[in-house]
Amino acid sequence: MPTHQLEQQIVAVKPITVPTTGRGIDLQVKVTAPASGENLPLIVFSHGNAWSMDGYEPLVDQWAAAGFVVVQPTHLDSRRNGIGFDDPRFGTIWRVRIADLHSVLDNLDDILARAGGLDGRIDRSRIAAVGHSWGGQTVGTLLGARVFDAEGQPGEDFSHPAVKAGVVIAATGTGDTLTPFALEHLSFMKPDYSTMTGLALVVAGGKDQSAMSTRGPDWFTDAYHLSPTPKSLLTIADGEHTLGGIAGEKVAETTDEDPVRVALVADAVASYLLDAFDLDGAAWGSLRDRAAASEGLYSIDSK
């Protein structure tokens, strides 16, 4: 599978400040979009821990070139905000992340108007949420997943009616096998996927061994196996947590650098969402058909 050059010209606008409360630091977003086109589908993207709206260009640029408007917030845990694991605010950042995505969705018209008049170019019936790692768990809540509390009871419903489909990439598995560090600092990593009813693609790496769980790479497939239908699962056999470097080229976290793998993730997300939104089913169908002939590079399951 070849790596990509952009198929069409794209534009990006940043920063755009989004109204929100109880955060202490302004919520800012970046908007990336095709330079032309109407009735465009839209992706709200939630980054992994410590990243920002400036990451994940290998994915975002390809999605924009494929016809999506992409809105990327900088969450409070971004390294540029200096809030580490030992900061007393860290324990509630998972809730702030969810609130960030709700604020973006609730203020889309204003955000897009300030991004060069994009408010007149999107299709509001075709909005997706996509996230990687912690962002994957964050997006899962917008699709209906909940978080178990200390007593093992599922928490409140954070789903958002504007989100019609989603993609969770390398998302947290169930929390009964968290390491002592994760239990102390990341106790919210206890998702309840039984209520994640939204249409979704789960993306997992076959060699993604988390330092937060005593389980193996199958931990990252819980969002598929434990959630209701309809769901699809893309497993990338040799993928580790950054799946070849989806957060950016030459970044420190990338332990399995592979542009082909990154291109596969970008293609799969765009193809899946175009199919989910009844815009183009050919690319997703082709990706599924090629899975058997991929020489073990990836597999796709659906239920």
Image: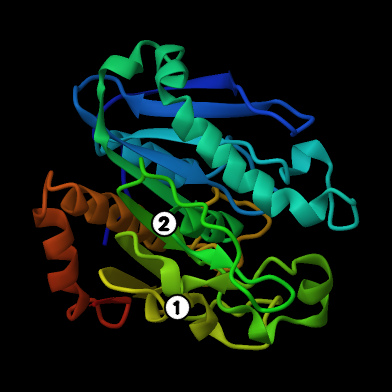
The answer to which image quadrant residue 9 occupies is top left
Q: Position of residue 208 (x, y in %)?
A: 55, 76
- Could you tell me which residue is drawn at 33 percent across and 17 percent down? 119
Looking at the picture, tell me which residue is in the foreground, 225 or 301. Answer: 225
Residue type at the position of mark 2 = Leu
Q: Is disc 2 in contact with disc 1, using a CB cutoff of under 8 Å?
A: no
> Can the viewer see residue 91?
yes
Q: Position of residue 24 (x, y in %)?
A: 79, 30
Screen quadrant of the N terminus = bottom left
Looking at the picture, tell me which residue is in the foreground, 258 or 262. Answer: 262
- Could you tell me which residue is drawn at 43 percent across and 46 percent down? 160
Q: Which mark is residue 221?
A: 1
Residue type at the position of mark 1 = Thr
Say how many tags the image has: 2
Q: Which mark is residue 143?
A: 2
Judged left or right of residue 228, residue 26 is right
Q: Residues within 10 Å of mark 1 (few under 14, many from 20)?
A: many
Q: CA distance from mark 2 to mark 1?
A: 16 Å
Upstream in the sequence, badge 2 or badge 1?
A: 2
Looking at the picture, tell me which residue is in the foreground, 24 or 237. Answer: 24
> Can the viewer see residue 239?
no
Q: From this view, report whether residue 237 is shown above or below residue 158.
A: below
